[in-house]
Image (spheres, rainbow, N blue to C red):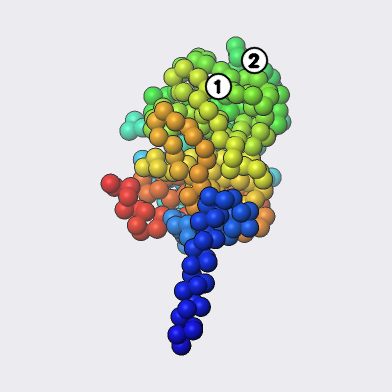
Amino acid sequence: MARFWVCAAGAGFFLALLVLHSRFGGAPVLRKFSFQISWRTKEILYRLDVGWPKRPEYFTGTTFCVAIDSLSGLVYVAQRGDNIPKVLVFTEDGYFLRSWNYTVDTPHGIFAASTLHEQSVWITDVGSGSYGHTIKKYNSFGDLVQVLGTPGKKGTGLNPLQFDNPAELYVEDTGDIYIVDGDGGLNNRLIKLSQDFMVLWLHGERGTGPAKFNIPHSVTVDSTDRVWVADRGNKRIQVFDKDTGEWLGAWDNCFTEEGPSSVRFTPDGKYVIIGQLNLSRLLLVAAPPVGSIGNCSVISTIQLADQVLPHLLDVSGKTGAIYVAEIGAKQVQKYVPMNSYFLSFGS
């Protein structure tokens, strides 16, 4: 028995030496071992809500995008297909309310921008028909309110505005609009418009350097006045000052396998949620403090099934739930925060 304990103590001492050596000596095998331990102990922050929506048979096309109006508790889903409703409206509890198909050709991105006085839904349309290459504003019942761009005509112009496959937009409470224009089209640019649709600043050149893009696919704004762009083709996220357009930095260390397709923040601002289309994966990344972009640091991951293909996502500002539009699975799935994480929203 004594011999057993001597052996056990020796084995423990040897393992401790190996761990120390891996930290300071750089043994690759042990670095891999330590990474596996770290990955396995990552906190699980979200779980799938298997009951959302209540009736998934309403998904009759390819679901490309989803937007949450946290003020009214509505979820908008835009889908593609022939002879189907292009926009579906659900409650955050998963009950189907209505659908509409007015003046929508081929939706790509969608954003809900409601205030106490107005409920609005913005859709980027990449179709080749008479409504294509535009960004359109609707009310919550699908009535067309505003059109940006030249309907049915792609282009690079700014006066008047022209788009070519506009990917997504983000609308602030002030009415200022951030647009990423170029899902494989003529343009690779980030545009900020005022509430009266005047160009405030622009980054618009294709390339790999700072403030240049290759398929800018998703855009969001955080609570510290920074604009985040999923620069999908360049396998990075670029960050800008929202007032001046100044380039603040980029993340590329998390995207060696595939670039980001979607980017959003949790309501508390602690995490960046990033979708990776072909990997069928969501990353939960620690948000950097003010004044430092730093490197991408993955806190947790949500691995979806193969070929689910999460295209664009949105996050409820009220509950923190993540809604994911999946073009492979042709559905939208909802992931809700675990209880301990949910409580932190109120802190």
Looking at the image, residue 14 lies above or below residue 182: below
Which residue carries the number 1 mark? 191
Q: Earlier in the sequence, mark 2 or mark 1?
A: 2
How dense is the environment of label 2, judged by Cα within 10 Å: few (below 14), some, or many (20 and up)?
few
Tell me the element at label 1.
strand
State the residue in front, 54 or 331: 331
User: Which quarter of the figure has residue 243?
Assistant: top left
Rendered residue at 59%/23% (across/down): 211
Rendered residue at 49%/83% (across/down): 4
Percent from the top left, x then y, of residue 296? 52, 40
What amino acid is found at the position of numbered circle 2 in the picture?
Answer: Gly
Q: From this viewpoint, is residue 313 visible?
A: no
What amino acid is found at the position of numbered circle 1 in the picture?
Answer: Ile
The number of discs equals 2
User: Which quarter of the figure has residue 148?
Assistant: top right
Is 106 left, or right, of 119 in this rendering? Answer: right
Q: From this viewpoint, is residue 318 visible?
A: yes
Which residue carries the number 2 mark? 157
Percent from the top left, x then y, of residue 277? 63, 46
Mark in the foreground, 2 or 1: 1
